[in-house]
Amino acid sequence: MKFSDILGNQQAVNRVRQLIDNDRLPHALLLHGDVGTPKLALARAMAQYLHCTNRTGGEPCGVCPSCRQHASLNHTDTFYSFPYHKKHEESVCDDFIPEWKDYLDENPIVEDFQTWLATLKIENQQPNIYIKESDNIMRKMSMSAFTAKYKVHIMWLPEKMREDCANKLLKLIEEPYDDCKFIFVSDNAKAILPTIFSRTQRIELMRVPLGEIAAYLMSTYGIDQQQAMAMAASADGNVSQAVRMLQTDNENHEFHERFVELMRLAYMRDLVKLKAWSDVIAEMKREKSRRFLTYAARQVRENFVSNLHTPGLNYMTREEEQFSIKFAPFINENNVERMLNEFTRAEQEIQGNGNARIILFDMAVRTTILIKR
Ligand SMILES: [Zn+2]
């Protein structure tokens, strides 16, 4: 992550760059601002710049070993905490690093709590930062830095920290080890416990101007200026909302086409093309292929329900509805459950780091058996 990747907020960027250049970065810095301002990206750019061994023109070089570790989110002296759900009493953030990497990989420019919940698949829960994580942080910070002069701990959403966790961290934040830098990244600084808040130096990030959001959407997603401006305007300076709206639009359309393709090829028993189809899905990022499988399961369910002809039970877009007219009769009580199981199982196996090509092709082959001519 480079400073030039940060949308808007030139003042904040200049300030943190200067702090690092002058070796005056405080032990506990709070980057805060409205939802949809690029705070986490700035924290990552700061850590990379701090660790870069060959800073060039006020930017990290991007090629030194430390920059390369940052790019792959594997820097040995950079740690992350974030809200998570407890799988068991001992759960800490490190248990969720694969999901965290997927999430940052897919949402590098601006963070978005809803997307994080979706990545964790816990949309209806309220994750926190629990006391076990404070033990984990203290353990990491007590070790000396591996390769860099400073260890950096980035905590995303300290306002989600439980009080017992915060209390345990207080001393470490107040009297830190010389080589420790905390960067807190908050959507809502008012909700941070006062004991933590008062111990930080603070920099506020501002909403990104519409023109800049639109330019970002155009260059990243290849949409035209009119659509980009419309998205930026309805998102009201919230970059993550604009991106989410656009991604949902684009992705829904793409997933629909892939779903139709799968069902057509399965009906025709075209194994060669099904192999190519599964390779395309396998090449998506892991999170995206999982979202596709969730989408496919939902379509199967929707099509089954639409056979009942009960208005109000169906939630389909116009193109999905159009396809459903001919497709729905193929989904019935004989195959609906097994079909749903196929998608759910594939999704879980991919989450468990199985070989996506094999998992998806197996699933596609079994779909040919379930779709009766
Ligand atoms: Zn570098």
Image: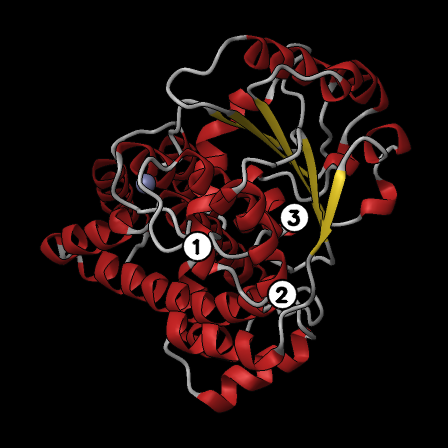
- Residue occupied by mark 3: 113
Q: Nearer the viewer, residue 303 or 233?
A: 233
- Residue occupied by mark 2: 241
| Secondary element type, mark 3 | helix
What's the residue at 42%, 49% (across, down)? 1
Q: Is mark 2 within 8 Å of ligand 1?
A: no
Is residue 43 positioned above or below 243 on the image? above
What's the residue at 56%, 44% (across, down)? 43
Is residue 216 positioned above or below 29 on the image? below
Question: Which three-letter amino acid code belongs to the residue tagged 3?
Answer: Phe
Which of discs 1 and 2 lies nearer the camera? The answer is 2
Q: Is mark 1 within 8 Å of ligand 1?
A: no
Report, in whole angstroms, how far the alpha carbon at label 2 lies from the one at label 3. 11 Å
- Ligand 1, image quadrant it occupies: top left
| Secondary element type, mark 1 | helix
Q: Nearer the viewer, residue 88 or 175?
A: 175
Label 2 neighbourhood size at 10 Å, few (<14), some (14-19), many (20+)? many
